[in-house]
Amino acid sequence: MNEEEEKWQTLEDYLSEVLNRGGSDLHFSPKSPAGVRLGGKMRPIGEKLLTSARIEELTMCVLDERQRQLLAETWELDFVLDSDQGRFRGNAHYTRNGLEVAYRVLPTDVPMMDELGHRSEAIDLCKIRQGLILITGITGSGKTTTQASMVRTISKIRSGVIVTVEEPVEYVIGHAAALVKQREIGTSTKDYPSALRQALRQDPDVIVVSELRDRESASIALTAAETGHLVIATLHTLDAPGAIDRLLDLYPGNEQRQIRMQLASVLQGILSQHLLPRKGRLGERVLATEILRTNAAVRTAIREHQLHRINDYMQQGKNSKMFSLDQTLLELLQADAIEYSDALAVCHDANFFATFEKGLQETAAGAAK
């Protein structure tokens, strides 16, 4: 056994290295070295190429019999690993090269909203008593962490019962003023629709859904929001208007008008977020958000399916506790917190930054003189 093989014998060895480097994710992929994500970019761990057999060896020992059987039947598996190194979310899946696995580092404590970089407008969402709140963003944008932070905040300021439906449970949230019941798909409940139907019978004040994935789950969530509950759910979309479209796309065309009516009446807000590299600091990221709050104009736009108006409403909605992603990006640029190219990669309207770009060019020209 050579020196590198001695160093990387167990999964714990790899996880420890990720934590020591301040990484967010660990990746095992055949025909490649193990990889760690630092500040959004991949870096190799060692030089030895992993094989599918070696990845299976590292993985199967941390799965129980039910999880191994589920992976064999469905060829993919979400799970949470509690190890000596900490708590990690895992996803095992097969590709043409064999088994691959990704691990996400989970903080041991649920961070507060302001610690994540959320503005007061986002924290105000936690004070809403009923209706639907959506959290959106791409994979890896921190939606789950924001959702857990909202649950923690609500549990401290509101007496009642909070029921969560998650796959898997990533953050363990203790009871406070509210009683928090966390249910996990595959271990404490069979699927989202069943869990949501049962949640309505469990005397909930708040229902939290880790993701609205199908029409049945979305319909139950909308009904729950209509009947006086607060429902908080995530969606994989780039922005607030995209979240509305994503929900509508779950339904056939002949049902969409009714869903628009229903959504317009229950939607309270959409929080959309991105994580961008912090300028000049390898491994650190900055939260960039936009918030849509529903008012008469927004509800009309949803009912009439004129979603192109929503970005303008956010841009002009400072007094309504909403703002656009472009406004947040401009503030981050002015604070010299992010690179201009990173802002352009996620912004809605590049022309919005034209004045700022001109200022950068004038500053550069002055420095050259």
Image: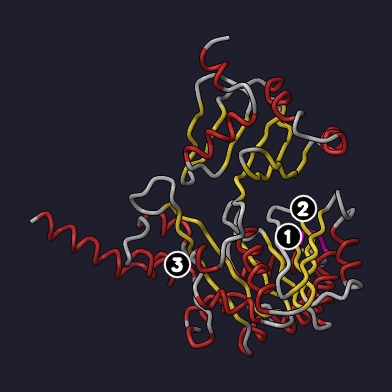
Circle nearer the N terminus (2, 3) = 2
Q: Quadrant of residue 341?
A: bottom left
Residue 332 image point, x, y percent: 38, 65
- Please state, as top left, top right, bottom left or bottom right, where the N terminus lies in the image: top right
Query: At 41% from the left edge and 59% from the top edge, which residue is drawn?
Result: 343
Q: Determine the secondary structure under disc 2.
A: loop
Q: In this view, does 168 lie to the left or right of 24?
A: right
- Please state, as top left, top right, bottom left or bottom right, where the C terminus lies in the image: bottom left
Inter-mark Cα distance, 2 to 1 = 7 Å
Q: How many numbered marks appear?
A: 3
Residue 285 image point, x, y percent: 45, 54
Q: Determine the secondary structure under disc 1.
A: loop
Q: Residue furthest bottom?
A: 296
Q: Is the magenta stretch mostly helix, strand or loop?
A: loop
User: Does the magenta portion include 83?
Assistant: no
Residue 52 image point, x, y percent: 69, 23
Asked if the residues shown at circle 2 and circle 1 are in contact, with their CB atoms under 8 angstroms apart, the answer is yes
User: Does the magenta portion include 214?
Assistant: yes
Nearest the eye: 156 or 104? 156
Where does the magenta region start and end? 212-216
- Which of the numbered marks, if any, corresponds to residue 167? 2
- Which of the numbered marks, if any, corresponds to residue 322? none
Label 3 belongs to which residue? 349
Inter-mark Cα distance, 1 to 3 = 30 Å
Label 1 belongs to which residue? 210
Q: In this view, does 68 lie to the left or right of 304?
A: right
**Residue type at tag 1:** Ser
